[in-house]
Image (cartoon, rainbow, N blue to C red):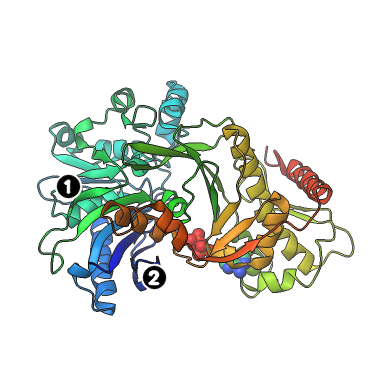
Amino acid sequence: MAKYIMALDAGTTSSRCILFNKKGEVVSLAQKEFSQYFPQSGWVEHDAMEIWHTQYMVATQAMAKINATAKDIAAIGITNQRETTIVWDKETGEPVHRAIVWQDRRTAKYCEQLEKSGLTDIIKDKTGLILDPYFSATKIKWILENVPQAMSKANEGKLLFGTIETWLIWKLTGGACHVTDYSNASRTMLFNINELKWDDEILKRLEIPKEMLPKVMPSSCVYANTAKELFDGEIPIAGALGDQQSALFGQTCFKEGQTKNTYGTGCFLLMNTGTKPVHSKHGLLTTIAWGIGDEVFYALEGSIFVAGSAIQWLRDELDILDSADDSEYYANKVSDTCGCYVVPAFTGLGAPYWDPYARGAIVGLSRGVNKYHITRATLESLAFQTYDVLEAMLNDADIELSGLKVDGGAAKNNLLMQMQADILGTDVQRNACIETTAAGAAYMAGLAVGYWKNMNELIENADVDAIFEPQISDAERNDKIKRWHKAVESTRNWEK
Ligand code: ADP
């Protein structure tokens, strides 16, 4: 019996490979950064070949580190930066252009045109997304229009499109398998999440030929085996999930209402809403969480633009911290924020406010406020922003919150996690395994090949590091939230 599951974690800045054992523990890890290209303001590109080469390299390195052979690997699962778009030649296997990364805004004007032509509501109803350059559709369109002969070749069926997992599966199988999973398909802005198929109307409006799109498959199933020449034996590729959905699965948020928050540079909140899509009234995204067997699960997704980066601001601009880790120590030097609130709306406010004209503020200052209070209030702002997005989700979905599971760099801050529990009035759970994103894809692959028997086995595996319980009264919580909203209000429309 094979000993490990291999997770390929194809991130935005690096390719990683993690081998997990049956208990869900990390037994080997290899990582390699790759180049970021910024050819113009607002443009971000990757070299798809470099992504493939680094990904293959770290896979062999992770195996070599523990002397594992192909026989030791039960299956491969892939998790990936979402939306990033690659178009390649079916015959030669050569990308026709660099990958256009999710952050890339080059299609903003085109999105405005689509909006004017009345596509906004159609996109929202059919794909669950907001019409935005972020998603793959307009990036594909840009490549077809700007690469010589791309449009005619695509129409002749000579070009293929894929997000990163599709590209990697195609490379891993020597060009034999052109597939994606439901979670990644739902980020293209071309996939009808209600009918679970590529949407002919949207494809027609954007003039994207259907022939170039991959086949959409469940997130957990054997897509194909790796090509013979890659490893010392064939390995089944059996799982694929977009990174945020993968963290949701890796956190074992299998049931409706279960929610995870990743505290990184920004925050990514995903709530499992069960087997029916919930359309948001607060500007949240409706997305497919995963497909297993015949069932598709959906999620509501909200992001917070400035989270951990507010701590970096304290460190780099205000110079009141030496490191992000110090924030906990300094904030603990005082018992409260002395009535001050920090609203880090540096680039405007996202969900549920959607105010691009808001700008940051520190309010409630009195003579006694010092740098420790400001540090504490900045940490609190992460918890308040999370509260706002979660409230919006709960209103949209009409479901009860059953705790919050956390991961990401800033989730190791115990004070922040306690603040989060206090402000939400619910338990906050942090797992011992911090590789939740990679774990999600590994779990998908492991379930597909019977390495893990069922989802209960995965829940039993989850090793809890800490649970933070609310410690303040409802009255105190309500008062804090009221003041936070007053603080947010003071930042609205600042730039207008
Ligand atoms: P990303 O994946 O977005 O690069 P990470 O998950 O690596 O982010 O988390 C890094 C972010 O978390 C940084 O913005 C940093 O300021 C913040 N951070 C890291 N450690 C702490 C900490 N102990 N307390 C608060 N914030 C932290």
Q: Is residue 188 above or below residue 472?
A: above
Task: Please rate how many residues cluster around mark 2, counting C-alpha atoms within 10 Å: few if below 14, some from 14 to 19, many from 20.
Answer: some
53 or 490, nearer to the observer:
53
443 or 478, nearer to the observer:
443
Q: Residue at x 67, y 62 (%)?
A: 416
Q: Is residue 384 above or below residue 17?
A: above
5 or 198, nearer to the observer:
5
472 or 163, nearer to the observer:
472
Look at label 1 and name its amino acid: Cys
Q: Residue at x 13, y 45 (%)?
A: 90
Q: Quadrant of ligand 1?
A: bottom right
Marks 2 and 1, Cα distance to the nearest angstrom? 29 Å
Mark nearer the N terminus (2 vs 1)? 2
Look at label 2 and name its amino acid: Val
User: In the picture provided, is 334 more to the left or to the right than 171?
Assistant: right
Q: Is residue 436 above or below residue 403?
A: below
Residue 465: x percent and y percent? 56, 67
Residue 467: x percent and y percent? 62, 62
Q: Nearer the viewer, mark 2 or mark 1?
A: 2
Element type at mark 2: strand
Q: Which quadrant would the C terminus be assigned to in this image?
A: top right
- Disc 2 designates what residue? 26
The answer to whether residue 46 is visible is no
Element type at mark 1: loop
- Disc 1 designates what residue? 177
2 and 1 marks in contact (CB < 8 Å): no
Residue 379: x percent and y percent? 68, 60
User: In the picture provided, is 424 more to the left or to the right than 46?
Assistant: right
The answer to whether residue 407 is visible is yes
Residue 330: x percent and y percent? 73, 72
User: Residue reaching furthest right?
Assistant: 367
